[in-house]
Amino acid sequence: MKNQLNIMVFLSVLLALLYMTRGYWEGWVVGALSVAFSLSVLFIAVVIFFENRHPTKTLTWLLVLAAFPLFGFFFYLLFGQNHRKNRSFSMKAIQDEQAFRKIEGQRQLNEDQMKNMGGHQQLLFRLAQRLGNNPVSFSTETKVLTDGKETFAHILEALKLAEHHIHLEYYIVRDDELGQEIKDILIEKAKAGIEVRFLYDAVGSWRLSKFYIQELKGAGVEIVAFAPVKLPFLNHKINYRNHRKIIVIDGVIGFVGGLNIGDEYLGRHSYFGNWRDTHLFVRGEGVRTLQLIFLQDWYYQTGETILNPTYLSPVLTSVHADGGVQMIASGPDTRWEINKKLFFSMITSAKKSIWIASPYFIPDDDILSAIKIAALSGIDVRLLVPSRPDKRIVFHASRSYFPELLEAGVKVYEYNRGFMHSKLIIVDHEIASIGTSNMDMRSFHLNFEVNAFLYRTKSVTTLVSDYVYDLEHSNQLSYQLFKNRSIFHRIIESTSRLLSPLL
């Protein structure tokens, strides 16, 4: 089926181009092309039907193809092909699992410390271990970095102190003031003999200048694009992006969270103004997991194997860990939608409160039902989202969920002190998730993500305090007022939501 689809895709693109120049051809040729194009659309519809996707996605794609054949055809070629079981992703999944079992499997779960957790919390961390092949660590120090200024102050200082190697993995890298500052440090370190590896996403960083890249390469930095796209209509991986933000320095300290490399993340964008985001500084045992995630992504893209003690067995200074930390990677190469499963477990295990922050809120039916049931059960459920859009279709699709959430008792807040980009879940003020994964279908099903799951650490306390502070700079939505919004807004929201399984 896959080979037939690839051949059909190639022929269909060719036929479609010819069809668009039909004025130069005789009528019988135009008729033949019209038939061929219609058959191509029909073939894609049959493929979608037999892929046994979620019924909502299947119906959405069929509706798009039926209503907008030409638009739907090209949109499917770009974003619709289901390659979760693509051979290259399957091989990556196998290789990653083997590497994690070999490296992280040597670290046994500390049962004595696990016993101090509640029963439902033990279930979450055991689930995370089974899905992510990584046990919870009680020897990891974390510190919450509340905004871009604090985050990059720590990052720049740490980069300057690097002694052996620097590993960076980012979705967006910009050639602006911040990007130049980081580039200059990396060049200086590379010239000093320090190993520097830089993995950036080819689509997220598509505006990154060739000169920027060449400067780094010329200084000895190994910089590589993740999943480059040369022929978009024939590249089945264009929709599967590396959304991770990871820095590992000397295998001893690391950074993970929501901030990319760009001036807007420091609040320098005239439209967004203050950029509210959250990052995490990591020291100790948990850094090895971030290192392993990077090394496996590096191997997938370059074929270079560097799983050796130099990077994975650094001399770790003793850290004052005050709770449990678990680093979990998820992506389209995994059998399970790992972060979705863990978020679902967190939500359904809550006893008192569920506080969520996400710039892009497009839950699937499972997560949406879990949130509403929790609120209807009397649990304090809060959702913090931006008040202004950066992606308008996603913004309006998110708002289409608000009426049913508000009716169920969820407290929805819109952040009004700039743009809110934090990605958090805090349950019962004891467990939290912080990382790159949004509460949306793209993060659940399509993107490569990484999150830190925290249990009773000081960082959880900080996240709670920061969340309360953010609510003071937000407007709480009223169900009565929101449901009376204009018909124009309802139409936009409903139309955007219709496309949400494709976003």
Image: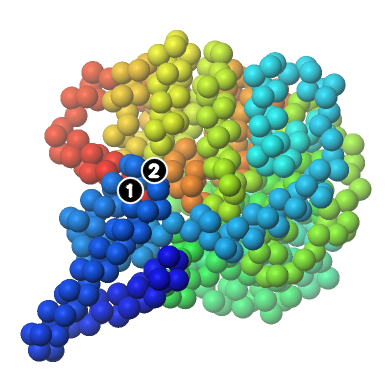
Q: How is the image coloured?
A: rainbow
Q: Answer whether labels 1 and 2 touch (C-beta < 8 Å).
A: yes
Please tell me how crowded label 2 is: few (under 14), some (14-19), or many (20+) other residues with Cα within 10 Å: few
Determine which quarter of the picture holds residue 31.
bottom left
Rendered residue at 77%/66% (across/down): 305
> What type is the residue that disc 1 sits on?
Thr
Q: Which disc number belongs to residue 96?
A: none
Q: Is residue 273 left or right of residue 34?
A: right
Residue 315 coordinates in the image, percent (x, y): 91, 48
Q: Residue at label 1?
A: 58
Residue 286 coordinates in the image, percent (x, y): 77, 41
Q: Residue at label 2?
A: 54
Q: Helix, strand, or loop for circle 2? A: loop
Residue 457 coordinates in the image, percent (x, y): 72, 26
Q: Is residue 400 visible?
A: yes
Q: Nearer the viewer, residue 19 or 46?
A: 46
Point out the image quarter for the N terminus: bottom left
In the image, residue 177 sits, relative to residue 412, either above or below, namely: below
In the image, residue 7 sits, relative to residue 372, either above or below, namely: below
Q: Nearer the viewer, residue 87 or 242?
A: 87
Q: Nearer the viewer, residue 310 or 319?
A: 310
Q: Is residue 458 visible?
A: no
> What type is the residue that disc 2 sits on?
His
